[in-house]
Image (spheres, helix red, strand yellow):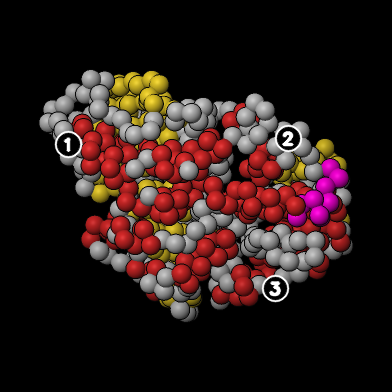
């Protein structure tokens, strides 16, 4: 229903008819025609600013860090900044959209770029600054809610029901509208449409990119969807699995204990790929048993003390690695790889090593409290396996069509000629890597030629949206996508940078070339710091 609010092609064709010259002024009068169907503008401001400060404006979302667009950072920029608020009549919502344009036409690279959000953060003014610094026209949206507000403030109506318009806005509607408005403003200001249009995001930004690929691929020529939180209906409910089991088993291990399990598993499985580098490149071949650490003493700091690993602690960790299962043992969603930090899904605050309180993953806690229980005071105390199963089923039943972003029918994207690159760190501690593998496998089954327009890369040893010891492609993936779109350079490899293996290399980093899934990045012998020592199998 909400997806019908905008008719993209009709809007662009009808409103792109009166182009202005490149000497157009950055004024409110210039953008008088900046409108799309089925929205009512509430406020509209245009600012022409030279030396606009970018200090402190780089945003991070609730899930990971939003990667910057490649380019040289600068403290200021010259920008035409448009900020407008609008509503969808009858929906009682308010959406804020931000549009940034290089103030001088000579600084525009003839392209349009949107940067994604993270967690419940859909976007904002900050997300247009990095693209404009690099010469792009850009736009962003707050997704229909105040980014400083708690989820309950916008997720529920006054009578305690799901605020469906706000959730639709956040999921996909406001994103598409921001793209339409941003590209229209670009046309008005420069007198020509962008030659190429891109989406670049990770985490929630990766899910947003996949939502556009599924619903509005005609808006973008290329999409980067890193660590995408697709299948949100399952991912969000699965995020409460660890704290739920902690309550059920009545065990709340401090971070030092969780880190001990991760370190032991990594050490046990590190060299399965032939290289001792702190990376588990073949997680499917790792069969480390959490129970093998039962009885081991862990010496902790913050808080100081020693603690003995119990059978219940091992059961809890094994279940996090395995992923949610129903009360009768059936698969619900994926767990995390052995080298992923466990403390992200099972945060604890401790007075002492044996007196800890669980701090759930905020996205999952919000999801269950606000959108499933619809009760901000909801707690895990007394929750049974049957209760958890019921909440999980409710999440899939009610929300898969709205925010699941799990459709693998990418026929519209194929027809539009849009290209998409997805990548996911295999040590991701927030969004299970195998959720993306699952999505791509289903996409391959739906269309055996999907690699012609959509490719997926796994990054061994990389945590959420980057970092870790592993081969991180976050600084090269966007340029790789551009080359695919603009030069037809098919990405058979993806350049990535990892921590060097000592002592054979004096450099702090090494370079590798990741493989398009289902090929596997494989060490074939030689110097592990040399790219030629790896191939795709």
- Residue 328 vertical placement versus 250 (above, below): below
* Residue 162 is a magenta residue: no
Residue wearing tag 3: 287
Which quadrant would the C terminus be assigned to in this image? bottom left
CA gap, disc 3 to disc 1? 62 Å
- Local SS, label 2: loop
- Residue 2 vertical placement versus 425 (above, below): above
Q: Earlier in the sequence, mark 2 or mark 3?
A: 3
Which dot, 2 or 3, sits closer to the camera?
Answer: 2
Could you say where residue 451 lies in the image, as x and y percent from the top left? 38, 69
CA gap, disc 2 to disc 1? 49 Å
- Local SS, label 3: loop
Q: Tell me, for residue 375, which label it has, or none.
A: 2
- Residue 331 vertical placement versus 125 (above, below): below
Q: Tell me, for residue 346, which label it has, or none.
A: none
Residue wearing tag 1: 17
Start-end of magenta stretch: 381-389
- Local SS, label 1: loop
Residue 101 quadrant: top left
* Residue 382 is a magenta residue: yes
Query: In the visual, does 235 lie left or right of 56?
Result: right
Q: Label 1 crowding class (10 Å Cα cut-off): few <14, some 14-19, many 20+?
A: few
- Residue 448 vertical placement versus 16 (above, below): below
**Residue at image x 55%, y 65%?**
438
Q: Are marks 2 and 3 in contact (CB under 8 Å)?
A: no
Residue 263 makes an appearance in the image: no
Which dot, 2 or 1, sits closer to the camera?
Answer: 1
**Residue at image x 80%, y 61%?**
327
**Residue at image x 42%, y 70%?**
447
């Amino acid at each position: 229903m909400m997806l019908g609010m905008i008719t993209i092609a009709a809007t662009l064709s009808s409103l792109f008819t009166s182009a202005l010259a490149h000497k157009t002024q950055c004024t409110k009068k210039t953008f008088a025609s900046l409108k799309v169907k089925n929205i009512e503008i509430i406020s509209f401001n245009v600012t022409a600013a030279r030396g606009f400060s970018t200090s402190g404006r780089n945003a991070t979302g609730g899930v990971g860090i939003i990667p910057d667009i490649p380019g040289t950072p600068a403290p200021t920029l010259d920008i035409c900044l448009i900020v407008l608020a609008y509503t969808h009549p009858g929906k009682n919502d308010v959406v804020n959209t931000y549009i940034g344009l290089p103030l001088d036409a000579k600084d525009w690279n003839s392209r349009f770029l949107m940067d994604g959000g993270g967690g419940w953060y859909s976007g904002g003014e900050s997300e247009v600054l990095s693209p404009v610094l690099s010469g792009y026209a850009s736009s962003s949206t707050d997704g229909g809610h105040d980014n400083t507000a708690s989820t309950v403030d916008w997720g529920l109506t006054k009578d305690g029901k799901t605020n469906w318009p706000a959730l639709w806005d956040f999921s996909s509607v406001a994103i598409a509208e921001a793209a339409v408005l941003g590209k229209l403003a670009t046309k008005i200001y420069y007198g020509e449409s962008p030659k190429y249009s891109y989406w670049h995001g990770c985490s929630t930004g990766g899910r947003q990119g996949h939502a556009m690929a599924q619903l509005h691929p005609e808006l973008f020529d290329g999409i980067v969807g890193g660590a995408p939180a697709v299948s949100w209906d399952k991912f969000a409910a699965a995020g409460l699995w660890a704290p739920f089991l902690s309550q059920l088993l009545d065990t709340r291990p401090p971070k030092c204990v969780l880190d001990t399990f991760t370190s032991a598993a990594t050490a046990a499985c590190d060299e399965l790929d032939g290289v001792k580098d702190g990376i588990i490149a073949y997680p499917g071949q790792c069969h480390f048993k959490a129970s093998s650490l039962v009885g081991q003493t862990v010496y902790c700091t913050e808080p100081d003390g020693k603690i003995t690993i119990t059978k219940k602690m091992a059961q809890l960790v094994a279940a996090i690695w395995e992923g949610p299962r129903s009360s009768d043992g059936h698969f619900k969603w994926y767990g995390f790889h052995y080298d992923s930090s466990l403390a992200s899904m099972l945060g604890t605050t401790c007075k002492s090593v044996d007196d800890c309180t669980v701090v759930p993953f905020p996205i999952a806690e919000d999801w269950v409290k606000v959108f499933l229980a619809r009760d901000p005071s909801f707690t895990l105390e007394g929750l049974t396996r049957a209760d958890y199963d019921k909440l999980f089923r409710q999440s899939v039943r009610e929300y898969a069509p709205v925010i699941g972003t799990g459709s693998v029918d990418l026929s519209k994207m194929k027809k539009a000629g849009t290209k998409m690159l997805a990548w996911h760190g295999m040590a991701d501690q927030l969004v299970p890597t195998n959720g993306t593998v699952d999505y791509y496998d289903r996409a391959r089954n739906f269309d055996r030629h999907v690699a012609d327009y959509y490719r997926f890369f796994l990054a061994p040893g990389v945590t959420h949206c980057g970092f870790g010891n592993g081969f991180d492609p976050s600084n090269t993936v966007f340029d790789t996508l551009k080359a695919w779109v603009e030069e037809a350079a098919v990405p058979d490899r993806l350049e990535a940078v990892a921590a060097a293996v000592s002592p054979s290399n004096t450099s702090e980093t090494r370079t590798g070339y990741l493989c398009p899934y289902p090929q596997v990045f494989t060490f074939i012998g030689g110097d592990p710091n040399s790219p030629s020592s790896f191939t795709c199998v």
